[in-house]
Amino acid sequence: MIGVLPETLTVCGAEYTIRSDYRNVLQVFEAFSDPELEPGEKWTVAIYLLFEDFSCADDVEEAARDGFDVNEAAKQITWFISMGKENKKDRELPVYDWVQDEQMIFSAVNKVAGKEVREVEYMHWWTLSGYLNGVDKEDIWTFIVGIRDKLNHGKKLESHEREFYQKNRDLVDIKPPKTEEELQQEAERREILDEVL
């Protein structure tokens, strides 16, 4: 129905209430970018983060043994996160990363919303996505996204884009997520440096 924000998802004819706040969706994104999790584990995490009936992986696994269709739930989650849009068959390289771009994204969204959205107790994922779609084309974040898109498609950068990219590669290049082991090694290096300095 037009104008209604979904609060439930239907899996094999049964309606399930979902945790529709945007923060839950961002946690799903974090799970999917976690190199330590296997694909099946990522979907299990997504299900218990979004479906109110589940509070942990064991709940999802028990429900699956009792006939809960995890594949259908995954399709419904994909529909919800993509705001009802058809899933593209060709997976494109990402042009933004919620973890890496968090401050730029929220700065841009806050301008559209006219408030600090992270301070709002609840905001539906589709509402936040609507704000995201309304971000000014002149915003620094959309400028960076434009550069990434051109690079992903092998298009030539304008001279001002090329100059910005050369000076700000750390902002433009999306970094792969680090494993727990890599994070531990970094912490150990920092500890050693702190002792030496």
Image (cartoon, grey):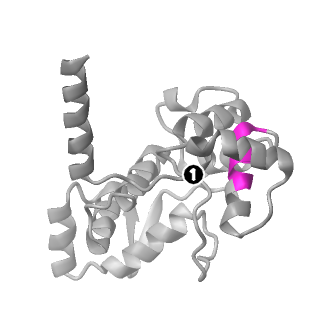
Q: Quadrant of the C terminus?
A: top left
Residue nearest the observer in this picture, 152 or 68: 152
Q: Which residues are magenta?
A: 139-147
Q: Position of residue 75 (x, y in %)?
A: 45, 76
Q: Main secondary structure of the magenta part?
A: helix
Q: Is residue 96 above or below residue 63?
A: above
* Element marked by disc 1: loop
Q: Position of residue 32 (x, y in %)?
A: 38, 61
Q: Position of residue 59 (x, y in %)?
A: 17, 64
140 magenta-colored: yes
In which image quadrant can residue 148 be found? bottom right
Residue nearest the observer in this picture, 101 or 150: 150
Q: Is residue 146 above or below residue 131?
A: below
Residue nearest the observer in this picture, 141 or 148: 148
Does the image show residue 56? yes
Type of amino acid under label 1: Asp
Residue at 21% from the left image edge and 51% from the top image edge: 181
Q: Position of residue 103 (x, y in %)?
A: 55, 34
Mark 1 residue crowding within 10 angstroms, few (<14) / some (14–19) / many (20+):
some
Q: Is residue 189 left or right of residue 113?
A: left
Mark 1 — residue? 173
Residue at 27% from the left image edge and 39% from the top image edge: 186
Q: Quadrant of the N terminus?
A: bottom right
Q: Is residue 71 left or right of residue 77?
A: left
Residue nearest the observer in this picture, 157 or 106: 157
Does the image show residue 134? no
Q: Is residue 82 left or right of residue 47?
A: right
56 magenta-colored: no
Residue at 61% from the left image edge and 68% from the top image edge: 84
Q: Is residue 155 left or right of residue 46?
A: right
Q: In the orientation shown, which residue stands out farthest toward the front?
A: 196
